[in-house]
Image (tube, grey):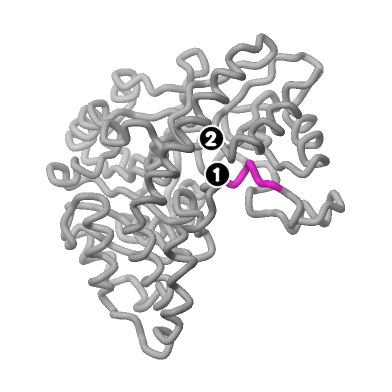
Amino acid sequence: MIQHKDHFHGSDLEKIEQFYGIKKESITSFSANVNPLGISPALRKTLAERIDAITAYPDRDYVSLRTCIADYVGTDLENIIVGNGTTELISLFIQAEHPKKAIVIGPSYSEYEREIALGGGTTLYYPLREEDGFKLHTADFISHLKDDIDLLVLCNPNNPTSTCISSKSMRLILDACMQHGIYVMADETYVEFAEQMERITSVPLTHYYNNLVILRGTSKFFAAPGLRLGYAITGNRDLIKTINTRKNPWTINSLAAIAGEIMFRDEDYIYRTKQLISSERRRMYELFSARDDFKVYEPSGNFMLVKILRQELTSQDLFDRAIRRGMMIRDCSTFPFLDDKFIRFCFMEPAMNDKLAACILEA
């Protein structure tokens, strides 16, 4: 197992407050990758009116919520599983499949490896190459797939590189995985932020491949990490049945279930989010691309990976500089295959993006 160093996560504002003596309320987190618009206005306006829902148990099968999600993603109700955040769903999937050997495309989110290890499995990493802009070389990757691998885990768009795999490439990967008996778990946490999302998402492929499960949640795009509402999409009904027999009932509370339905139907909020991120992603990428002391990798998500080319400057230096000005970025030295020359930050409102850029790019 790759050893992961200690670091400040985007949710560790209390630790930041204690370590740096900065009030957490005054910190703008460019590390958490959360929608800068905040929660859906429709949710803010109407959820309090539904407070009486907590006087009754939720529907054990969450039919209304799952129907809403199915409409939102474009699939059938029977293909949706809901859970207490994607973390619970990852755990349930690992418990159901019991992979002895998994391959993860990295650098990536460490929770995959942790859950695989808890299930008694081992994890191999296929590293994305910096010389390829951290984009997956599909043919080379497929050549590394073997019969002794049980599970492939990928994040699309990937965290922290913000690169993506097209649905066309995913078809090739899924075909190869079928031949080797490999199940594929695709984390699409950030896909809703992507330009031309329909060219990236694998949801339509669940109608043709029964070795695919897709994970999504409401923490990032809908700015609601505290709801702990996640969902999975798969066309494998046997897998759904297995997971449902292992799931505890009512892992989503009544208000979270109602909130989900409100958010997924707030079309104006969804549109404004996509427009803002698209505009700021393009602007920030061009701004940093114009510099010869930083290297940027073309982003597909709502965040960007940046390499520091100044010899005397490290990711910890920039983290310290930014946090002392009330802005938290991600020091990426803790990710496998990255070092202390890489940082990641998400896109916020234009004025805050300008403030962060001025901080990072100053001489």
Tell me where residue 249 sits by quadrant: bottom left
Q: Is residue 326 visible?
A: yes
Q: Residues within 10 Å of mark 2 (few under 14, many from 20)?
A: many
Queried whether the magenta region covers residue 60, the answer comes back as: no
Do callouts 1 and 2 mark residues in contact (Cβ within 8 Å)?
Answer: yes
Magenta stretch mostly in which secondary structure?
Answer: loop
Question: What residue is at 40 percent from the left and 74 percent from the top?
Answer: 251
Residue 254, given in percent of the width and then of the height, sits at: 39, 78
- The residue singled out by tag 1 in the image is 33
Is 18 placed left or right of 257 in the picture? right
Residue 106: percent from left, percent from top: 48, 32
| Observer able to see residue 103 | no
- N-terminal of the two: label 1 or label 2? 1
Q: Residues within 10 Å of mark 1 (few under 14, many from 20)?
A: many
- The vertical placement of 204 against 218, above or below, is above
Q: Secondary structure at mark 1?
A: loop
Between residues 233 and 67, which one lies in front from this camera angle?
Answer: 67
Image quarter of the N terminus: top right
Q: Quadrant of the C terminus?
A: top right
Residue at the extreme bottom of the image, as rendered: 55
Identified at 77% across, 14% down, the residue is: 311
The magenta segment is 28-33
Which residue occupies 17% across, 62% down?
Answer: 78
Residue occupied by mark 2: 303
State left or right for residue 98 relative to residue 179. right
Quarter of the rendering containing residue 163: top left
The residue located at (45%, 73%) in the rendering is: 47
